Image: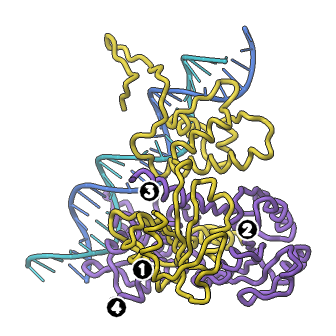
Chain colours: A yellow, B purple, C cyan, D blue
Amino acid sequence: MRTAGDTDEGGVRRRKKAVAPAETRGWMKRLTLERLTRYYICLCDNSSRSQSDVVSSARIAECVGVDDTQVRKDLALIGVRGRPRVGFKRGEVIAAIRGVLGFEKQCKAVIVGAGRLGGAIAEYPGFADFGLSIVAFFDNDPEKFDTVIGGCKVYSTGEMKQVIRELGARLAILTCPADSAQVLADELVDAGIRAIWNFAPTTIVTPEDVIVGNEHVSVGLVALTYYLRRSE
Amino acid sequence: MRTAGDTDEGGVRRRKKAVAPAETRGWMKRLTLERLTRYYICLCDNSSRSQSDVVSSARIAECVGVDDTQVRKDLALIGVRGRPRVGFKRGEVIAAIRGVLGFEKQCKAVIVGAGRLGGAIAEYPGFADFGLSIVAFFDNDPEKFDTVIGGCKVYSTGEMKQVIRELGARLAILTCPADSAQVLADELVDAGIRAIWNFAPTTIVTPEDVIVGNEHVSVGLVALTYYLRRSE
DNA sequence: TAGATTGTTAATCGATTAACAATC
DNA sequence: TAGATTGTTAATCGATTAACAATC
């Protein structure tokens, strides 16, 4: 890929010296996104126990389980420069990732299904750090209406359209049983939700312009138990 | 790779006709494992709504979001043969995946942290289908001792070593706060646990022979919100 | 048979790793 | 300076896709 900093002169390719701007145009690839998120978790995690404010690519690489070259490439991509012999400034890396992944931009979400899982997600620390704020719960159990979980009121699913519009939520987190997941997803789309994070143990489908993340936790379970069972 | 079925005669390479045995020796690669799990979820999910007992590779591929060639390769790997013009028998595929991934072999697990997340996991339907059975809870809140969640008694974390030995659990599911995760993990290793599924929002480390799955749910969240925020 | 779908090889594509110069 | 770490290109490796013959 050529950028404005490149020059060809008399057939000699000069190395670009440009102050690389954070690559905020164009879409990050899924795998890159995942790695950046893991770097971020790792750096925030370590910041409490380490006194040093610089970190080498090798250290991040070890923590996340990738090659150190990969880490340097990813950081270069988002415009972070390290210092040879020293490393990367932890705070700079964290800030760059937050900027590129958009953590500063608040994202309002509703949780559909005020059960244990919904409550657990609402109280999960750290989600706020990613710019996520839960603004309401929905459930179809009248006993739960008007109760408060994690500071949010529980509404009837019948009120979804109105409440979601009022609060301006764009993301919905589905923690309902499998058999009602698709129906609720359809209603959420109708209510103007733009993305659905689905924890129900089923796959839901939506119109093309509504993003779905099917969080099949079982995938992680199977990987783990596969190795466990085979090592016995 | 050559297998016993291959033959070279006079320089002519014959196609092997062997009845491919399920590839149960050797270790499945992580990505293959993930795809097989997704096929499985998709097939079990559809079985309730579809009346047909055959399914084409193209259909599975669409459901899971991979190429249909990939599906046929994966199924060939685990020894499932399809019929041209017809497809694969749903039940055969499900059985083969269950066999290769070891779902028939029961895996006993304990949950450490009897909070909302722990409760949600215990009541999550479908885990039983993967051969997972929860046999006990541990918590350090005396108010919870001897209560029952999802049919399992809650013990004190101080009793972990003894109870885990008695029940013969090999897997531990960590749903405690981040700050106690590493300490509890160390104790679990000491108690003879062979694998830890970590839901605490931190990364834990263990001796090499204890498998860890750090379930960073945030990774899924970031991917979803990234696209959401950028599409506005 | 004709047509659809599997099974498998070959080609492409992308991601990871290796190598090494640049730099502090 | 010497040595360590970054930054970047080139090479390798593996995964995905394309092509097509085999098969029912």
Q: Can residue B24 be seen in this view?
A: no
The mark nearer the N terminus, 3 or 2, is: 2
CA gap between label 3 and label 2 equals: 35 Å
As shown in the figure, which amino acid type bears the numbered disc 3? Answer: Leu
CA gap between label 3 and label 1 equals: 20 Å
- The verdict on a common chain for dots 3 and 2 is yes
| Disc 1: host chain | A
Q: What element carries label 3?
A: helix
- For this view, does A151 lie left or right of residue B52? right
The label nearer to you, 3 versus 2, is 3
* Residue at 34%, 91% in the rendered image: B51
Q: What element carries label 1?
A: helix
Q: Where is residue A125 in the image (x, y as percent from the top left)?
A: 69, 61
CA gap between label 4 and label 3 equals: 36 Å
CA gap between label 4 and label 2 equals: 39 Å
| Disc 2: host chain | B
Q: Mark 4 points at which residue?
A: B51
CA gap between label 2 and label 1 equals: 34 Å
* Residue at 40%, 22% in the rendered image: A5
Q: Is mark 4 on a helix, strand or loop?
A: loop
